[in-house]
């Protein structure tokens, strides 16, 4: 009978060493982050042996926050281990603006890409996939008539105008190295963000633009399953309209609007300085829309996130509707343009269930201008939002990554509503005083402890 691996590993160990080995295995089970486990195994031979004795696989991993620098040496933050680490970016991503990611450690870059154009790079294998930097757009009526009169109808039907494209954010239907992968990009339009799609397995590669372009696209996500909906890219606009975009042929994109009923809103009117940004997330076979409320100062151009609300698309019948979720359960959301993800929290996680992690990408069009003008990127409004009860302290593992907690409060007075942040309950009580103000605490926000301004590109989430 062949002894089990653990017995072989323990053979020739003294009793003290065997007890210490059991202790190390117990310590290893308390390390949820795979990077911490790799560091554990690299300490010495005995610790490496203990790592091999652990039968339990590491818990599900959460995304890492990648903070690129102007050089190849960049910083990544592990939410599970609450610690920063160094990472060497591939040459193609040094100085580039990161505009998308996909599970499997894929990251998309644009802007100052050394090879020119746009690329998707795997941070682990270093495999690179080139993305096109040209788009084919339908001809104008005048140009179509000119070609029709000079060359006949057939060349005109196939003719398209090829133009440069400035990518703001990219979403992928599959891993970028897959021949079936389709990429959808939010691009820089003349007045508002536009959208384009590319089948990465096609040759030659180019971005295709639909004949009818929804105005003000804020986010794009690939939704593969769910009720009576077909696998396609879903788009949300700045006026809460949901669109579906899919390829008909290699150069033809069909876009149609979904009729979705919204519930009665308890925030029908917002304060004059409060605005809304939107994200799409796929979770548990459903499509979610996340509304991000933020204040904006026109005097200095600064903004501050104040509140999040999550709605789930009810798509089991032909009548689509949004349903607001009071709780996310054991999930956590990681928001980023075209790269938002929902993750089930590992067992015994010290991250509060229902947490929403966010980056400073509200006015993500500014990052495109920064790529062109070499201005400073904005990193002032990043952190985590969660619903919390006053006086309740949640043992958050990432306490050293985030600053002090701010309470988000709704204040209603004489028919007017305000959304305000307070450092503590005493400050809220002092502000209210004896005035007849209705107060409702919605949640808490904690910001990333990070420098206020830098010329480094904007950060992004990436998942193993």
Image (cartoon, grey):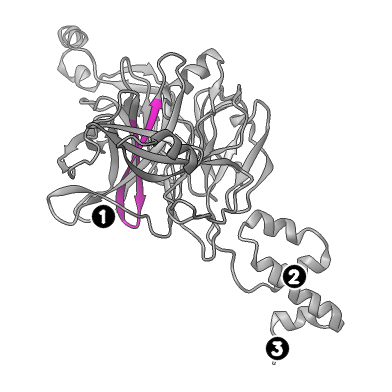
Label for residue 226? Answer: 1
Q: Earlier in the sequence, mark 2 or mark 3?
A: 3
Asked if the residue at tag 3 contacts the one at tag 1, i.e. Cβ–Cβ closer than 8 Å, the answer is no
Outermost residue toward the left in this view: 318
Question: Could you say which quadrant of the image residue 448 lies in?
Answer: top right
Asked if the residue at tag 3 contacts the one at tag 2, i.e. Cβ–Cβ closer than 8 Å, the answer is no
The Cα atoms of the two marked residues, 1 and 2, are separated by 44 Å
Q: From what the image shows, is residue 123 above or below residue 147?
A: below
Q: From what the image shows, is residue 199 above or below residue 347?
A: above
Element under disc 1: loop
Q: Earlier in the sequence, mark 1 or mark 3?
A: 3
Magenta-colored segment: predominant secondary structure: strand
358 horizontally vs 142: left or right: right
Label for residue 2? Answer: 3
Q: Which residue is mark 2?
A: 24
Element under disc 3: loop
Viewer can see residue 100: yes
- Residue in view at x 68 percent, y 56 percent: 36
Q: Quadrant of the N terminus?
A: bottom right
In the rendering, at what x and y percent does residue 406 appear? Answer: 49, 40
In the rendering, at what x and y percent does residue 189 appear? Answer: 33, 19
């Amino acid at each position: 009978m062949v002894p089990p691996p653990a017995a072989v590993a323990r053979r020739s160990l003294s009793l003290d060493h065997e007890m210490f080995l059991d202790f190390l295995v117990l310590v290893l089970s308390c390390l949820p982050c795979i990077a911490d486990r790799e560091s554990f195994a690299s300490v010495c031979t005995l610790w490496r042996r203990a790592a091999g004795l652990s039968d339990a696989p590491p818990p599900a991993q959460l995304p890492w926050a990648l903070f690129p620098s102007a050089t190849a040496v960049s910083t990544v933050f592990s939410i599970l281990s609450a610690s920063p680490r160094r990472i060497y970016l591939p040459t193609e991503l040094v100085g580039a603006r990161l505009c998308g990611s996909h599970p499997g450690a894929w990251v998309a870059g644009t802007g100052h890409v050394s090879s020119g154009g746009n690329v998707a790079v795997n941070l682990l294998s270093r495999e690179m996939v080139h993305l096109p930097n040209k788009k084919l757009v339908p001809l104008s009526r005048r140009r179509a008539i000119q070609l029709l009169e000079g060359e006949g109808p057939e060349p005109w039907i196939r003719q398209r105008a090829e133009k440069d494209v400035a990518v703001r954010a990219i979403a992928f239907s599959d891993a970028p190295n897959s021949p079936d992968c389709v990429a959808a990009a939010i691009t820089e339009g003349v007045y508002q963000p536009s959208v384009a799609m590319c089948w990465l397995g096609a040759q030659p590669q180019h971005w295709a633009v639909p004949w009818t372009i929804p105005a003000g696209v804020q986010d794009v996500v690939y939704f593969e399953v769910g009720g009576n909906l077909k696998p396609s890219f879903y788009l949300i606009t700045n006026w809460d309209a949901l669109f579906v975009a899919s390829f008909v042929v290699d150069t033809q994109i069909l876009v149609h609007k979904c009729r979705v009923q919204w519930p009665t809103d308890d925030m029908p009117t917002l304060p004059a300085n409060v605005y809304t940004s939107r994200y799409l997330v796929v979770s548990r076979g459903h499509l979610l829309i996340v509304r991000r409320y933020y204040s904006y100062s026109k005097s200095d151009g600064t903004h501050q996130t104040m509140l999040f609300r999550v709605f789930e698309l009810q798509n089991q019948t032909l009548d689509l509707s949004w349903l607001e979720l009071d709780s996310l359960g054991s999930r956590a959301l990681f928001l980023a343009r075209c790269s938002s993800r929902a993750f089930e929290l590992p067992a015994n996680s010290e991250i509060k269930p229902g947490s929403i992690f966010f980056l400073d990408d509200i006015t993500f069009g500014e990052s495109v201008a920064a790529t062109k003008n070499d201005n400073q990127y904005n990193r002032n409004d990043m952190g985590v939002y969660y619903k919390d009860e006053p006086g309740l302290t949640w043992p958050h593992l990432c306490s050293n990554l985030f600053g002090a907690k701010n309470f988000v409060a709704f204040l209603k007075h004489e028919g007017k509503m305000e959304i305000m942040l307070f450092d503590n309950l005493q400050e809220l009580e002092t502000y209210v005083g004896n005035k007849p103000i209705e107060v409702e605490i919605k949640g808490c926000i904690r910001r990333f402890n990070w420098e206020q301004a830098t010329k480094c590109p904007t950060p992004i989430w990436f998942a193993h």
